[in-house]
Image (cartoon, grey):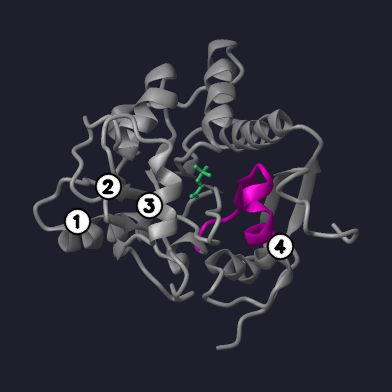
């Protein structure tokens, strides 16, 4: 069946902290509208400021996350949730441990599962039973969303993937303990991501500008997996001026 292409909403913010403000406000609004909202969450350096603001909003009594269900996008293979370089650890450090999220409603991928393929199936089935009210995404310099690297199909489901050398190099900077980024991961697929009711993509800095341009301007194609977001009717790109630098006057 041919897909309909949609134009996303694009917000270009002068300062990158305004990206954090806008994204955290959007998440807070969703949770205040539906206390048991389903949130799809991302890791990486870009969302840290968003999570800081969500923690502050909770401290200030502006929102409660106690009934919210969360689903993370991806996880490195081989790392237990207690490992400082796991995305599970990241989530507890930056968000869950600073707020009132209910551990029973937090869904994370078991990176250290003995059978990663079976874990991908388990998590994918659980994810597919929920429809996220809001999916938060970053974008890789190579255009990936989650760990759907270039070449990933729009129909892709949750699975074990090998990471590109460029992704491993980019993520090297954020490692706390490991010397090298793991070679493989489990990621939610693009088809899973597109099930969300609404999607926010945040990007900051000039290194993201080309991927952002391709995702928004090119016809959807697997060399830039984020371009498949054009198939979704409710995508909001929240960009700082540098990340939006190649979009031209139209944006
Ligand atoms: P970053 O990663 O936020 O660390 O740049 C984004 C991504 O790879 O999705």
Residue 51 rendering spot, x and y as whole percentages: 52, 28
Above or below: residue 103 compared with residue 231:
above
- The residue tagged with tag 4: helix, strand or loop? helix
Mark 3 lies on residue: 168
- The residue tagged with tag 3: helix, strand or loop? helix
Between circles 2 and 3, the one closer to the viewer is: 3
Residue 212 belongs to the span the image colors magenta: yes
- The residue tagged with tag 2: helix, strand or loop? loop
Comes first in the chain, label 4 or label 2? 2
Q: Which mark is residue 109?
A: 2
Q: Nearer the viewer, residue 106 or 52?
A: 52
Give the Cα separation between the discs numbered 4 and 1. Answer: 34 Å
Give the Cα separation between the discs numbered 4 and 2. Answer: 31 Å
Which residue is pictured at 28% across the width and 32% down the height?
104
Comes first in the chain, label 1 or label 3? 1
Comes first in the chain, label 4 or label 1? 1
Q: Tell whether label 3 touches label 1 (CB within 8 Å).
A: no
Q: Tell whether label 2 touches label 4 (CB within 8 Å).
A: no
- The residue tagged with tag 1: helix, strand or loop? helix
Give the Cα separation between the discs numbered 1 and 3. Answer: 22 Å
Between circles 4 and 2, the one closer to the viewer is: 4
Ligand 1 within 8 Å of the CB at mark 3: no
Mark 1 lies on residue: 119
Which residue is pictured at 53% across the width and 68% down the height?
225
Residue 100 rendering spot, x and y as whole percentages: 41, 20
Question: Is residue 91 at all visible to an observer of this figure?
Answer: yes
Mark 4 lies on residue: 213
Indicate the quadrant containing the N terminus: top left, top right, bottom left or bottom right.
bottom right
Which residue is pictured at 20% across the width and 41% down the height?
79
Q: Which residues are magenta?
A: 195-213
Between circles 1 and 3, the one closer to the viewer is: 3
């Amino acid at each position: 069946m041919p897909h309909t292409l949609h134009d996303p909403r694009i917000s270009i913010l002068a300062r990158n902290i305004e990206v954090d403000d806008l994204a955290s406000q959007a998440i807070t609004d969703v949770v205040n509208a539906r206390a048991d909202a389903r949130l799809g969450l991302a890791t990486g350096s870009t969302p840290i400021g968003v999570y800081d603001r969500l923690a502050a909003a909770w401290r200030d009594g502006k929102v409660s996350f106690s009934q919210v269900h969360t689903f993370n996008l991806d996880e490195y293979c081989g790392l237990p949730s207690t490992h400082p370089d796991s995305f599970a650890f990241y989530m507890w450090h930056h968000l869950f441990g600073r707020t009132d999220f209910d551990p029973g409603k937090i869904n994370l991928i078991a990176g250290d599962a003995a059978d990663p393929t079976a874990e991908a199936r388990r998590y994918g089935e659980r994810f597919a039973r929920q429809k996220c009210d809001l999916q938060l995404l970053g974008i890789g310099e190579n255009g990936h969303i989650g760990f759907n690297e270039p070449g990933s199909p729009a129909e892709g489901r949750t699975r074990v993937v090998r990471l590109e050398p460029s992704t491993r190099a980019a993520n090297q900077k954020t490692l706390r303990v490991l010397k090298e980024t793991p070679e493989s991961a489990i990621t939610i697929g693009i088809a899973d991501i597109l099930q969300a009711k609404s999607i926010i993509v945040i990007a900051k800095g000039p290194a993201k500008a080309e991927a952002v341009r391709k995702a928004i301007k090119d016809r959807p194609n697997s060399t830039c997996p984020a371009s498949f977001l054009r198939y979704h009717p409710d995508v909001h790109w929240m960009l700082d001026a540098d990340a939006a630098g190649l979009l031209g006057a139209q944006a």
